[in-house]
Image (cartoon, grey):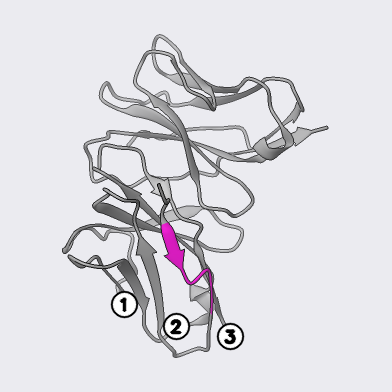
Amino acid sequence: DAKTTQPTSMDCAEGRAANLPCNHSTISGNEYVYWYRQIHSQGPQYIIHGLKNNETNEMASLIITEDRKSSTLILPHATLRDTAVYYCIVRVPSNTGKLIFGQGTTLQVKP
Amino acid sequence: NAGVMQNPRHLVRRRGQEARLRCSPMKGHSHVYWYRQLPEEGLKFMVYLQKENIIDESGMPKERFSAEFPKEGPSILRIQQVVRGDSAAYFCASSPDSAYEQYFGPGTRLTVT
């Protein structure tokens, strides 16, 4: 699975959009981009995933660049409860299934 | 629809005792994954199981650790002769298939005294 690079930490004002970047320059054609988050030592929570088209669900939007070497997770209206560590993971879904978590980005949403 | 359940949520064991951690996957999910998070560290994959089969145990320590997912009942992660370094949060996740996203349980926090 391709390696990902994320900023260590970010701040965001409550009510504003949080844009979390992820670089995955070695991504291969059949690898998907997944986002999970972990809120204060709880179990990780699946957010969204995509291959090459932009994706949106009730939690977030995922924007993948045309060359697929980077992506951005967007939380449109961040709340204090969105404070968490956000993980960007690249994997081929049909592989063994294990998720390889990096260090992630610690997002602090401030009032 | 109940999520992934893990029990106990907290477990205290003395050095040398055995720890048994249980995971009940979401309804309809037959794939289970175990991850470990040591204090102040990231999540590390341990093992991937389907019903009655171990698919990938590349992250399991070679000794003292074992996992099973029987035809009936929860998945069990067993740690024999626990040591202080086993103190960690152990998370279980499940999915209907390896190609799908994984849903995590709340974790079991193991403390070895």
How far apart are the two marked residues, 2 and 1, measured between alpha carbons?
11 Å
Check disc 2 and report the residue beneath it.
B82
Q: Quadrant of residue A69?
A: top left
> Which badge, 2 or 1, is on the more N-terminal residue?
1
Question: What type of secondary structure mainly makes up the magenta span?
Answer: strand
Q: CA distance from mark 3 to mark 2?
A: 9 Å
Q: Which residue is mark 1?
A: B63
Q: Secondary structure at mark 3?
A: loop
Residue B113 is tagged as 3
Few, some or many C-alpha atoms within 10 Å of disc 2 (few <14, some 14-19, many ≥20)?
A: many
The three-letter code of the residue at mark 3 reads: Thr
Q: Does B85 sit above or below residue A6?
A: below
Q: Residues within 10 Å of mark 3 (few under 14, many from 20)?
A: few
Residue at left offset 32%, top offset 70%: B76
Dot 3 or dot 2, earlier in sequence: 2
Q: Pinpoint residue A85: horizontal percent, then vertical percent.
A: 60, 42
Tell me which segment is drawn in magenta.
B5-11
Q: Is residue B18 left or right of residue B108?
A: left
